Image: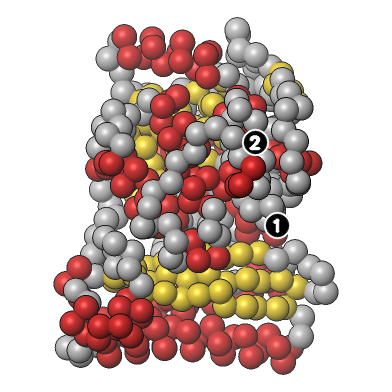
Amino acid sequence: MRPIHLLTLPGTLGANHCFAYGARRTLAAMTRSPANLAAPATTPGMPRTLSASSLVAAPRAEAVQAAAQEGPMPHSPIPIFTTVQRYRQWRAGAAARGETVGFVATMGALHEGHLSLVQASLEENDHTVVSIFVNPAQFAPTEDLASYPRTLEADIAKLSPLRSDQGQRKVSAAFVPTVPEMYPSGFTQIVEDQVGAFVEVKGLGHQMEGGSRPTFFRGVATVVTKLFHIVQPDRTYFGQKDIQQAIILRRLVKDLLFAHPPSPEHLRVMPTGRDNETGLALSSRNAYLTAGGRKVAPVLYRALCEGQRTWDASAGEPADVRVRTTLRNARAVVEEEVKRCRQQGSVTLELDYISLNNPNTLENLEEVVAKRGAEGIKVEEGAILSGAALVSEGKGGKVTRLIDNVLLGFRL
């Protein structure tokens, strides 16, 4: 039986209770008519082919060209916009009518976690726009840009039947641009050789995920800035799984005085979608996992849950003791699984990091303890317990990078 995943509505984001990931709403409850899954008709007036120039010339150029998503558009009941100009014509009409627009930015390969974000937007806005764009700027030259899953036809099929609770709203448009459309000055994955405007949020992108992926959040901030200017959303929706990304983007909206979305509070952060049986956070990259890898992958969430239990149980302890024991107990769970994998020899598991960070500054609390002791930690602000692990199977097998987090003592 296929596992059911957590899908929640706006306003339900609260405490992170580990292992409380039973489904609240299934996709069947969100789709009002199975007939909507029938082969869709071509949308009148919408372009059906993508044109992409060959202006991208750089190391890993084949990966960047793959991200251009060249090829015909699928038949779709949802208008598909491939250019900024055509989308803005549509957006101007919605603005003239005083209609609100919700926005979900994706790189495609949609899963039920993505669809829960879309569902949240359908409940709050007159229109919902979904972007599908594999952004090359957030991939390092050694990462999986060329092999990242691209499933546009399947993505449109998943979006088409979604409806609001009252059945009156559906996805209004998909924005599916090419790399040249989004990066008109050209693009290379070598940061030093890049030309044009890029965006970086200082102070929040070097820790946690930024420690392993130093240019990642620069790429995210750049493409999201572009998408916000193009889509002009009244509200936008991101998942808690990418907690550091959400915090960075809220700061981006605040510091650059965005009109769309009009405030950080209009950037909604929704709960992480999880496998109902194992708690594994839903991710497009989970498609890389082998059967053996899928058995091992949930260890990261188990480790974070152990850390959460330790944090909660040590509420009366000095802050430095609380930080150390939380991290020690969480890491021990992964370390034990690493030993087991080595003994069995089929699946390789490697812990990248498990980290405790301040939810406002993203300061590494372990480093704060080492430098200033308990006095440097404001426990009342809570903490983010996050981690990343690498899973692969067999010699030369595909490496899947898993990330996850839980919130300790605070709400987004």
The disc label shown at residue 156, or none: none
Res 323 seen here: no
User: Vertically, is 187 above or below 60?
Assistant: above
Left or right of 159, for residue 360: left
Tell me which numbered mark, 2 or 1, is placed earlier along the sequence.
1
- Residue 412, image x and y in percent? 27, 56
Which residue is pictured at 49% across the width and 89% down the height? Answer: 332
As rendered, which of 40 and 354 lies closer to the eye? 354
Left or right of 263, for residue 142: right
User: Vertically, is 286 above or below 355?
Assistant: above
Which residue is pictured at 29% across the width and 62% down the height? Answer: 361
As rendered, which of 26 and 359 lies closer to the eye? 359
Picture quadrant of residue 155: top right
Amino acid type indicated by mark 1? Thr
Q: Report the Cα–Cα distance between label 2 and label 1.
A: 16 Å
User: Viewer-nearest of labels 2 and 1?
Assistant: 2
As rendered, which of 14 and 225 lies closer to the eye? 225
Q: Secondary structure at mark 1?
A: loop
The disc label shown at residue 187, or none: 2
Q: How is the image coloured?
A: secondary structure
- Crowding around mark 2 (Cα neighbors within 10 Å: few <14, some 14 to 19, many 20+) is many
- Residue 346, image x and y in percent? 77, 80
Q: Secondary structure at mark 2?
A: loop
Q: Which residue is mark 1?
A: 142
User: Vertically, is 300 above or below 85?
Assistant: below
Res 333 seen here: yes
Amino acid type indicated by mark 2? Phe
Which residue is pictured at 70% across the width and 78% down the height? Answer: 348
Picture quadrant of residue 369: bottom left
- Residue 233, image x and y in percent? 36, 28
Which residue is pictured at 64% across the width and 27% down the height? Answer: 180
Left or right of 228, for residue 220: right
